[in-house]
Structures are given as C-alpha cells and as structure tokens.
Image (cartoon, rainbow, N blue to C red):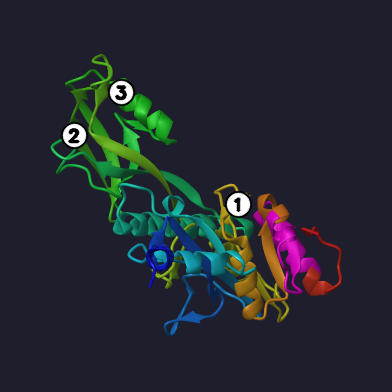
Amino acid sequence: MSRRTSTLAAAGFLVVTLIAVALLLPVPYVTMRPGPTVDALGSYDDKPVLQVEGAKTYPTDGEIRLTTVSVTRADSRVSLPQAVRAYFDPSEAVVPRDMVYPEGRTAEQVREETAAQMTSSQLTSEATALTAAGYEVTQVVTIAAVSKDGPSEGLLEVGDVLLAVNGQKVEDTEQAVALVSGSKPGSVVKVKVRRGGKEQTVDVPSQASPDDAAKARIGVSLGTDVELPFTIKNNLGDSIGGPSAGLVFAVALYDMLTPGELLDGETVAGTGSISAEGDVGPIGGVQQKLAGASEAGASVFLVPADNCAEAAAADDFGMRLVEVATFDDAVDALEKLSDDPKAEVPTCR
C-alpha cells in the first residue's frame, strides 16, 4: 500500500470514528411525546379520580380526559439520531434541555415543583367548580412557611389559617403584612389562627425587619388557600405534575355537582391551567396532547385561547378544537354541543 493510500485510509477511518462518536454523544435537548390521558370522571389505580364527600352528586355520561406529555427523564440523555427522529415526527418535539431541567436544579427539585403546581391546580379547580355550581367558597390567608430560628418557630405552624393580627380581622395577605410590620419592633404580636379546626391566639415576639428597622417581622411567609364547604379527594396524587389539568378537573367536578349530563356520552379531552377567577391559562406541549387525546378517542378538545394558533397549526386528528378563555366558556360550549353536536361554538379554526 502506498503512503498516499495509507494516509487516505487512516483519514477515512478517523472521519468514520468521529461521526460514530458524534452520533453517540448526547445533545443538550429533550424530546416530548404524547403521554397518557386520564378520565377525570373515571378511576385511577382502582380509585375514583375525584371523590366528593358531604355533598350531593349527579350521574355523568361520557369522559373528560386530562392530557399529558412524556418528557425525557432527567437522568437520561438524547442522542443526535434520537433528536433528529423526534424532530421529524409530527407528534413529537425537541426542546432545549434547560427549558425543562434548569441548570443548577436537581431532578428531585423539578419533580417537587411540578407536584406543587398540580396540588395548587387541584385546589383552584375545586374553588372554580364549586363557585360555578352555586356553593360558597371562602379564601383564607395561611402560614406558608416558618423561618428556622425565627420568632414564630414553635409557635406558628405551616397550614395555620391566619384569622386576625392584634385583634384586627385579616382579609388578605397584603393587609396581614401591613398589620405585622406596623407593630413596634420587639413588641408582642397577637396572632389569631385556626389549627385543626380550633381557634387560638398566639403571642409572638417580633423583631426588627432587616430591610427596615422601623418595621416589625415575625419570621413567617404567607400564602392563600380556600376553604370548601365539603371534602373533595383527588386520587391522582403526585403521579402527574404541573398545572395544566386545572381546567379538566374543574369541568369534571362541575359535571358531578350539577344536574344533567354535560358531556352527553362524548369523550372530551382538554388542557389548560385555571386561576381562582376562572381564567384559563396557556400550557406547553399542545401538539403532543392533541395526539394523545386522539389516541384516547376524543372528539372534542378544549384549547386555551392563547394556545389556539399553535393548535390550529398542528394536526387536529379530526377533533373539534374548542377555544376557551374562561371556565364559563368551556361549560357553555359543552352545553351547546351536548344539545346539538353541530352547534356553533368558538373554535381554533
């Protein structure tokens, strides 16, 4: 073999080796695929997804399915061929890894965050559905966190419902903060809370705020919660994370708590976060959720208004894409479609 031939052969071998290595090396992306769907009016792990205790419920007919996206696990890596294949698959997507798993945060931290979002979504959906069904829902201020070694440690607990500060009834978090910070630093702040169904007043010694020595602090963070007139159990647990099931949970509960069958035997799917005011917020993975809903046999898909353009550009798989900006929009559209499957309702196309 001549020197030229040997050099070319060696160079060719090196190129092939480099290409092989490049194909095997992970790329900084994750893939998104259609995930499982769950009927919020059905069962999960042999338990009803939603259980109402202490209130009358009505028969339902049909399915309202929450949709999910399956994302590459935090401990897995995507190779270049996998990323290319997913890119050209209309039911999949490729997104930068740090959009899903931010740098500096562990997989467990991400999981805990999405679990907390799901819990919050469940609570907001319950408040929305009950209010729409005519029940009274009360918003309350709660102790969300107690600072370690702070004035309230051992006196106040996470989950305490804050009723009054220095004898003045608490209406919201801003007012509660103003009442505490307006006390004289070093004075005792009388904090009335409800814990375990019992009311009690706790004397908490205050400290000067590190941001303003003229203002008092008691070392707690506040949050908001709602008190429902009866008990609702959501048996999905933390098996599914994120806020995007809020709309579906609210629709399912409303159907259970009101006379008549909202779905009229149809399989409806949807997605969207929901606020305490009933506004439906945008979510990610619309393309994958549409594909998952189609596989589950859905004929109607509830799409957040802000996701309509994205949904309209994707394959609708023969489903009717109903545009919803609020919870009331969703109920109104489903009632019309129940009466007449060909009824005119706002759509994304």
Please identify the quarter of the rendering in which residue 154 is found: top left
Three-letter amino acid code at disc 3? Ser
Q: Amino acid at mark 2?
A: Asp
Of label 2 and label 1, which has the lower sequence position? 2
The magenta segment = 310-336
Tell me: residue 229, above or below residue 212.
Answer: below
State which quarter of the image contains the N terminus. Answer: bottom left
* Residue 143 in which image quadrant: top left
Which residue position holds label 1? Answer: 282
In reply to whether residue 171 is colored magenta, the answer given is no
Instruction: State left or right for residue 307 relative to residue 31.
Output: right
Residue on which disc 2 sits: 203
Question: Which secondary structure lies at badge 2?
Answer: strand
**Tag on residue 181?**
3
3D distance between C-alphas at marks 2 and 1: 44 Å
Q: Rounded to the nearest whole Å, what is the CA distance between mark 3 and mark 1?
A: 37 Å
